[in-house]
Image: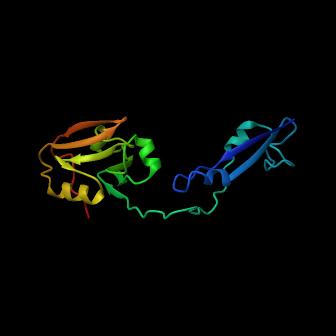
Amino acid sequence: MIYRFCLIILLGFVNPYAALLSQTNYFVSINGKDSGDGSIHSPFKSITKALAKHPSFPYPSVLRGKLKESSVLEWSGLSLKNLETLGERSATGMDSERGVYVISVRVMSNPLRDYIYANDVILGFNRQEINNLTQLKAAIRQADTNKPVQILLFRNQKKMQLTIPGNIIKPTTD
């Protein structure tokens, strides 16, 4: 008996329907071999092998519209970018494409890790509204980072105000 597995490659930066176009099928059979290629003629023996198979990613194509160019700011152990896609809005629970999205937080030797988490959206910095990276960089440059800094975040589908003690936030390098 042969079981069919469909692993769908989800490309968040491409139209959501693209996942249906980039589908890879693997087959598993009790008579198969894990040294096989997972095709119908050479099925895997174990489900684990089928799930561990890494399909090659096709060259992404935009099905409609234009891809937005986005820059990423590496700052104080945080990777930040403008919140600009429906996928990012969905992941964060935001109502619109505004604010600065925290992509990741490096935890080693990063004092901000105790305050700002991946998937947070920065909406305010030192009582200034933040809608994009440009505004955040300007607000950081203007701030006296030796004193406590107020940051308005959107986390877990609600706004929250944090006070970050002085000397933790470092100026941007660009």
Please tell me which residue is depicted at 56% across the width and 62% down the height of the picture: 62
* Left-right relation of 105 to 129: right
Closer-to-camera residue (123/143): 123
* Left-right relation of 172 to 38: left
In this rendering, the answer to whether 45 lies above or below 77 is: above
Closer-to-camera residue (174/126): 126
In the figure, residue 140 lies in which quadrant? Answer: bottom left
Q: Position of residue 108 (x, y in %)?
A: 35, 44
Quadrant of the image for the N terminus?
Answer: top right
In this rendering, the answer to whether 129 lies above or below 164 is: below
In the figure, residue 165 lies in which quadrant? Answer: top left
* Left-right relation of 109 to 168: right
Closer-to-camera residue (103/53): 103
Q: How is the rendered protein coloured? A: rainbow
Q: Position of residue 112 (x, y in %)?
A: 28, 43
Please tell me which residue is depicted at 59% across the width and 49% down the height of the picture: 10
Can residue 22 be seen? no
* Left-right relation of 20 to 108: right
Quadrant of the image for the C terminus?
Answer: bottom left
Please tell me which residue is depicted at 36% across the width and 49% down the height of the picture: 101
Can residue 69 be seen? yes
Q: Position of residue 46 (x, y in %)?
A: 77, 37
Number of residue marks: 0
